[in-house]
């Protein structure tokens, strides 16, 4: 399980250090892809395989399912660590998430997310302001704290 929030910088070549405890759980090869809300999702291979199976079960005749699958898989990149524990984030993913220098890396249960620091701060503030409302809506999904 991935937990926590960390601050790191991405260098001019697109390399970013991922926290050591995340690296261990991600394994030697992992997937980086477009995430929601303009962040990047980082999946261990096993989680990616589960997501792929779920995506295959979506109806291919549904336009939304096709669009989501195309964007998710076309944006995905298989990655591995360099000797310093960094990942080289491909240009198209850096552009998508607007990663320039300061980044926030968060653990979200089965995946890691990489955010532009300012984007994360704005998103986090907005979400914190409505945290109670969000929690109340989760009751519809039979979710209780």
Image (cartoon, rainbow, N blue to C red):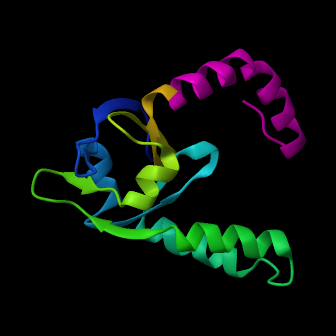
Which quarter of the figure has residue 52?
bottom right
Q: Nearer the viewer, residue 57 or 90?
A: 90
**Relative horizontal placement of residue 18, taking residue 113 as reference (left or right):** left
- At 26% from the left and 46% from the top, the residue drawn is 16
Judged from this view, the residue extending furthest toward the top is: 129
The magenta stretch is: 119-145
Residue 40 in sight from this viewpoint: no
- At 57% from the left and 45% from the top, the residue drawn is 38
Residue 115 in sight from this viewpoint: yes
Residue 62, percent across and down? 86, 77
Judged from this view, the residue extending furthest toward the left is: 83
- At 23% from the left and 45% from the top, the residue drawn is 12
**Relative horizontal placement of residue 92, taking residue 12 as reference (left or right):** right
Judge whether 17 appears above or below 87 on screen: above
Q: Quadrant of the C terminus?
A: top right
Judge whether 30 appears above or below 144 on screen: below
Which quarter of the figure has residue 19?
top left
Q: Is residue 143 magenta?
A: yes
């Amino acid at each position: 399980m991935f937990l926590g929030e960390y601050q790191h910088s991405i260098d001019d070549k697109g390399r970013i250090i991922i926290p050591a405890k995340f690296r261990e759980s991600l394994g030697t090869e992992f997937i980086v892809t477009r995430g929601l809300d303009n962040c990047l999702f980082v999946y261990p291979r096993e989680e990616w395989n589960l997501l792929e199976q779920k995506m295959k079960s979506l109806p291919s005749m549904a336009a939304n399912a096709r669009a989501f699958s195309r964007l998710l898989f076309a944006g995905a990149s298989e990655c591995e660590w360099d000797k310093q524990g960094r990942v080289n984030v491909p240009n198209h993913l850096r552009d998508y998430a607007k990663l320039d220098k300061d980044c926030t890396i968060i653990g979200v249960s089965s995946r890691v997310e990489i955010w532009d620091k300012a984007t994360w701060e704005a998103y986090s503030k907005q979400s914190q302001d409505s945290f109670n409302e969000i929690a109340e809506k989760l009751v519809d999904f039979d979710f209780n704290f």
